[in-house]
Image: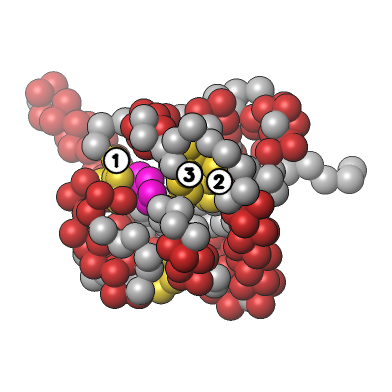
Amino acid sequence: MKIKTLLLAAFAFLLLISCKTKTEKENFNQDHLIYATIWYQNSPEMKALYYQGFNIAEERLKQYTKLKTAKPKAVVVDIDETMLNNVPFQAQEIIDNKEFSSEFWNEWSQLARAEATPGAIEFSKLCDSLGIPIFYISNRKVNEFDATLRNLDSLGFAFAKPEFIILRDNESSKKARREKVMENYEIVLLIGDNLNDFSEVFEDRSDSWGTPTVEKFKNEFGSRFIVLPNPMYGDWEKNIYPSRGMLPAQQDSARRSVLKGFK
């Protein structure tokens, strides 16, 4: 009788856990991404900011061509939300209520259907006309190389060639990949949507989300560092969530906890 009672209790416990897990999955949604994704996909302000960023980059690059450097000059750019627009992927996450996963992202990236961000192709062609190569340093994984090259090339980007595309192999930090470029080139300009696209000094955001480091290097922005808008995702998110594997309700609470109201 005792064994039977224990078995029934164990079964009830497993059933409860199963129902809880199912409920948690059912409660998951990506609603917190909706406004940012709509803004990025539809607002003229998004386009204006990209044009503004690339216009500034063009002005700076023309200035830097007059500088004497020990090595040939080069420009380093990020790919996603810098040169290529992946907002359909973000939108599909919301529509399907899917969490980000490498498999789902790979499904999108292998299509090689991302459009160019406003002003990106024209900027790449300007670099080509000035004889300054662009290196595309991205945290896309190396197994996405062929699709990435195909995507850039089909849109008409200059320097859409294997030797100018450097994807992630092991580590997400771009420091070593930038240093590889610097062996033969002087990097005069960097363009990206994430601070880590510019320098490893921005990787540690433990102190006030990394704001003190931005203050320290404030003169570089609009000069050597050109930041493009991306309200949908980025390394800034790490300061919201204290740990991985948080439940939807915990994630929602974490997001709300960092808001600062006026009361």
Label located before the other in sequence (1 or 3): 3
Q: Which of 50 and 238 is in front in this view?
A: 50
Q: Where is residue 48 in the image (x, y as percent from the top left)?
A: 67, 71
Q: Which residue, given by chain and number where applicable, does mark 1 sit on?
A: 168
Evaluate whether residue 251 shows in this view.
no
Q: Where is residue 184 in the image (x, y as percent from the top left)?
A: 36, 35
Q: Which of 143 and 91 is in front in this view?
A: 143
Q: Position of residue 80 (x, y in %)?
A: 42, 57
Q: Where is residue 124 in the image (x, y as percent from the top left)?
A: 46, 64
**In which quadrant will I find the C terminus?**
top right
- The reply to whether the magenta stretch includes residue 192 is no
Q: Which residue, given by chain and number where applicable, does mark 2 sit on?
A: 189
**In which quadrant will I find the N terminus?**
top left
- The numbered disc on residue 10 is none
Q: Which of marks 1 and 3 is in front?
A: 3
Evaluate whether residue 7 shows in this view.
yes
Q: Residues within 10 Å of mark 2 (few under 14, many from 20)?
A: many
Q: Residues within 10 Å of mark 3 (few under 14, many from 20)?
A: many
- Secondary element under disc 1, as helix, strand or loop, is strand
- The answer for how far apart the CA atoms under marks 2 and 1 are is 21 Å
What's the amino acid at mark 2?
Leu
Residue 138 is left or right of residue 141, and the answer is: right
Q: Which residue, given by chain and number where applicable, does mark 3 sit on?
A: 73
Q: What stretch is highlighted in magenta?
A: 135-140
